[in-house]
Amino acid sequence: MYKFLFVSLLLLGLAGTAQAQMSDQQVVDYVKNGISAGKDKNQIGRELVVRGVTQSQLERLKVQYEEGKTVDAGMAGVTVGSRQRKSPVDGAVLEVVDSLSAAPTAVAGRNPSRPVFGRNVFNRTNLTFEPNENVATPEHYKLGPGDEVIIDIWGANEANIRQQISPEGNILVSQIGPLYLNGLTIREANEKVREVFARKYAGVAGDDPESQVRITLGQIRTIQINVMGEVAVPGTYRLSSFATVFHALYRAGGVTDIGSLRNIQIMRGGKLLAGLDVYGYILGGKTTDDIRLQEGDVIVVPPYEALVSVEGKVKRPMYYEMKKGETLGTLIDYAGGFTGDAYSKEVRLVRRTGREYCLFNVGSPDYAGFKLDDGDSISVGTILNRFANRVEVRGAVYREGMYELGEDMNTVRQLIDRADGLKGDAFLARALLYREHEDLSIETVAFDLKGVINGTVPDISLRRNDVLEIASVRDLEEKGAFRIEGLVSRPGVYPFADNTTLEDLIIQAGGLLDGASTVRVDVARRLKDPKSLEPSSTLSKVFSFAVKDGFVIEGTPGFVLQPYDMVEVRKSPAYQVQRRVSIDGEVVFAGGYTLIRKNERISDLVKRAGGVTDDAYVRGGRLIREMNDEERAVRDEVVQLARRNGGTDSLAVEKLQMNDRYTVGIELDKALANPGSDYDMVLREGDRLVVPEYVSTVKISGEIMKPNTVLFIRGEKLKYYISQAGGYGSRAKKGKAYIIYMNGTMSRVKGPGKARIEPGCEIVIPGKRARKGISLAEIMGLTTSAASVGTMAASIANMAK
């Protein structure tokens, strides 16, 4: 059982996707019931696809089967598979799977690569064509075995009879006997019942109002019909007796890729009852051909007769099925007609003649009479990308743009009038008309615009695609922008305007800043002499002004700027911004200080801080400084140089100082002892002076046995401190030892190093670079190379003899 279920799920994996309508458990039950009923695996797969089983649902079921999970926890004992009980897939199952993998994938009759109009109407899950059984029984409905009839008698006599028509076509009425109703319509059945019941109930016959009898339909029967031909799931179906042809086609999964929608045949009693054209329903809502089915009806879907395609500028470009004798005009109607930008006067048609392709250019008068064949391909082009009656005006008019060329507007003067006339700054001496010729070349026509307006010059006739361009006098003048720099709120470029003064430009720039000089504002002016015949070494002319409250007080008042003037607002030489430094550690008044004057030194700062305390270790004082812009630029240039060298130079990127703060090596004790000397360094903004306490230890690090910090013993040599750290390491460079002092300076250790070791310092022992040994393979390679060289030398010696 589980083996069959697994094979069925593999079959379902070959199906197309649809909206899921069945739960996982319902799918499993359907497969099990189908196998029990003896159905073929292919048939089960097609039926499930028609019922809306999706590809993702099939993949999920397959994974659950392989992992041995229960499909529905609520269904006790129902499992898809088991790791322990799952039998291996034997040769028979593999043979079935191989046969299924060779089957066509379009089980539901769909081919996404060839969309055919109307082909999917019977595949949509939200369009089922199910009959409405909650309506009054149609008068022409014919009763048959399985229908339940209800006979109501009221008036002088009261009775109610509910009977189901037997397979023989009868109902059994008490005291009357069998009553044959098979094949009768509701109207005919009412007449017959009234006639028969008149024998039992007085007053029923005729139009006697004392007693009435009426027959209605209760539960309706199901009928068995056959759907054959080009449908997804051909076979026998049981449907409601209200079902129509459309419902039967939906239950059969719709037509296949080669099935016809235009000539569906309904056979009744072995004869052709009618032909159904689905396009009539889709395009016109015609339902008269949707015949109600009867027991034993056969629906046959033959292959299509002609399938043609239309592409390009139609509203529904796709494939369409055509009947014999239908024309190109009918196809265009099926496609919804032309789009707004379609070239509708002619279409291109490609036909396969059986030997080669043949091209037809069909004009619009022949659309209604040009008949189509199977395989025809129609292409509808687009209109030309040009205007038939367009002219354009640009420039100094009130309404630029494109205008219609016609009888009422076909000259230059009329075009200007349509554009609401010329602007006040229009250049009237000359206008340009750009004219396009038939070979698409452009000709420029210049004319006197003022003469055309005044009527002293003949008006110019316009042609299609003419472009009239009227310049402005301002466009013909070079108006360079102003530039203002320096200590103003908004330095930058400002557009030129006539009669702009220096005061106006300063106001536009937001006024002067706090540090601006009011006695020196320079204006640099471009030199120009169009009549000059000799070069000049003078580059510009500079005007200087003094200003107060935004007005010129010295120089030319109301100085009018010219194009390209450059204004520079200088900084006042007496304007200084406060510069802050700080001092921390063992001083009386630690904290931040503002420098009083330039070239203020370390000793001055210590003096302002009240001097050092008794606990200060002056020799260990250090200065921390922030990089300025110049230092950062130099550092970045050095880094770029190191990176360009790619590590080949001795300068390595990782060894460069990348921090914005660095320590300056100072000797604070000498600076305080000799104020104003070279030891007494000049301070800079951002400097931080640290005066530490006395530190009585020495730190040893680097290539030693164990880095350590020990007490400073005055007079002890380097050897003593190294021994306190366990001695040198195996890769130590003993002769390269150096000392880092608290004040930021460094020193090499020479000799025993007795006098160079101070409190708070750090002794660093550098190490040797690790050497890479030679592997056996490298040794063999060197040996082989040496042997080769020896052989070559011997050969050369023999040749030289």
Image: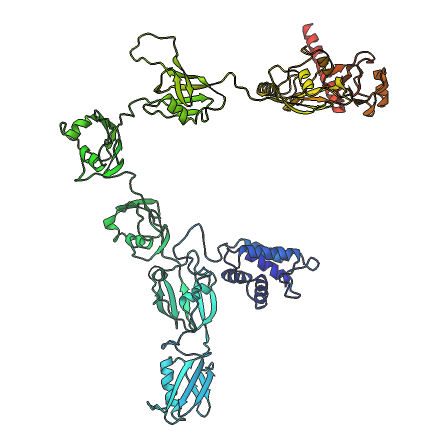
Relative placement, left or right, of 142 versus 372 is: right
**Residue 227 location in percent, x, y?**
44, 66
**Residue 552 location in percent, x, y?**
39, 19
Vertically, is 158 above or below 408? below
Q: Which quadrant is home to the N terminus?
A: bottom right
The residue positioned farthest toward the top in the image shown: 801
Vertically, is 702 above or below 354? above
Vertically, is 316 above or below 482? below
Task: Say whether residue 114 is visible.
Answer: yes
**Residue 549 location in percent, x, y?**
42, 23
Relative placement, left or right, of 151 versus 633 is: left
Relative placement, left or right, of 113 versus 275 is: right
Q: Which quadrant is home to the C terminus?
A: top right
Relative placement, left or right, of 614 versus 127 is: right
Quadrant hosting residue 123: bottom left
Q: Nearer the viewer, residue 723 or 670?
A: 670
Task: Say whether residue 702 is visible.
Answer: no
Q: Give the colour scheme of this rendering.
A: rainbow
Report the number of discs.
0
Q: Residue at x 70, y 20 (%)?
A: 610
Quadrant hosting residue 491: top left
Q: Nearer the viewer, residue 743 or 465?
A: 743
Q: Nearer the viewer, residue 358 or 310?
A: 310
Q: Nearer the viewer, residue 385 or 129?
A: 385
**Residue 505 location in percent, x, y?**
39, 24
